[in-house]
Image (cartoon, helix red, strand yellow):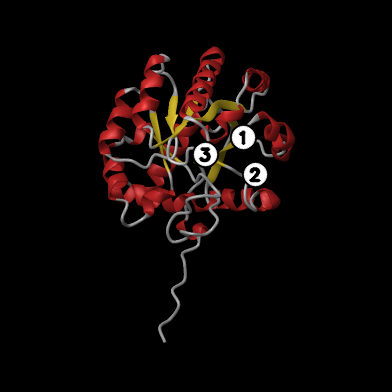
Amino acid sequence: MGRKKTRTLPEDLGLPPGGADSHAHLNMGTLGQELNDVLKKARACGVSTLINVFMGTEIYLKQRDLFHEHNHVFFILGVHPHEAGGFTSDTAEGIHSAAQNDIKIKGIGETGLDFYYKHSTPQDQKSAFKSQLQIAKELDLPVVIHSRDAFVETLEILIQMGFKDRPLLWHCFGQGKDQAEKILSMGWNISIPGSVTFKKNHELHSAVQVIPAEKMLIETDCPFLAPEPYRGKENQPALLGFTAQKIAQLKDMDINELWVKCGQNCRNFFSIHEQL
């Protein structure tokens, strides 16, 4: 019998402080039940800054205090396209008010279009998307985009709404070189998830090679999309280093340099000036 292969532990990567998880759902899966341990482990693995996503004001109001003592965790707030059918003027008002009054809310999102699952009609998705873009404009906040099977339509709305050269992050990018270059031509940033570590993800591999390090952020999208060698497991911020490791290989960069650079890109993008 062959010996069972042991996975590399994330702390064994030896990454320095300064990394940043630009998109995490820390209140989903079992992560919220073990939040302090999850954040402690992330710190031990070099993750100094985290952006937690609250999908709606109701969950934000219920759970924001979970992070009260965690000064390195910041928020974005928005309504996912899956939930766009329930978006009303009251929803928009709630997002606007919360984002205006909580300095930990650093952006609007994730918002956009998802024509893959079709949990909401295209009309409802477009309406909710435009409303949230308007809030981001009014409050001069960055916007974080979710787009699946709707690249052209998402781009059209962003251009119509005047978002060229505004602070915008294309979250969980999973497409190819052409789409990446189009996003970059608009002056936007791109966030790379753990799926970049998947061996057959050739399109994303080619895209990463053309995205300048200056425009790149890294994310877990936890508890989803755990990177190799933890694919299929519940993702968490401590595993972010495996994503950085693959990106560094693809870009022929020193992993520590890439790690700290992408972390600082995240802090710059979200106007975070914390002490690490």
Residue at which label 2 appears: 27
- Locate the C terminus by quadrant: top right
Q: Earlier in the sequence, mark 3 or mark 1?
A: 3
Residue 211 horizontal side relative to residue 225, left or right: left
Q: What secondary structure is found at the residue carrying circle 2? A: loop
What is the distance, in whole Å, between disc 2 and disc 3 at their CAs?
Answer: 12 Å
Q: In the displayed structure, would residue 125 be above or below residue 23?
A: above
- In the rendered image, the vertical position of residue 3 relative to residue 115, given as above or below: below
Give yes or no for contact between labels 2 and 1 (Cβ–Cβ under 8 Å).
yes
**Residue at disc 1, secondary structure:** strand
Question: For the residues marked 2 and 1, what is the alpha-carbon distance in whole angstroms?
Answer: 8 Å
Q: Residue at x 53, y 29 (%)?
A: 109
Q: In the picture shown, does residue 219 fall above or below 34?
A: above
Could you classify mark 2 by the number of other residues whose Cα lies within 10 Å: few (under 14), some (14-19), or many (20 or more)? many
Q: Which residue is mark 1?
A: 54
Looking at the image, is 127 positioned above or below residue 72?
A: above
Query: In the rendered structure, which amino acid carries the disc numbered 1?
Result: Phe
**Residue highlighted by disc 3:** 23
Spatial CA distance of label 3 from label 1 is 10 Å
Position of residue 194 measured from the top left corner of the image (x, y, whole percent): 43, 49
Characterize the local packing of mark 1: few (<14), some (14-19) or many (20 or more) Cα atoms within 10 angstroms: many
At 44% from the left and 54% from the top, the residue drawn is 227
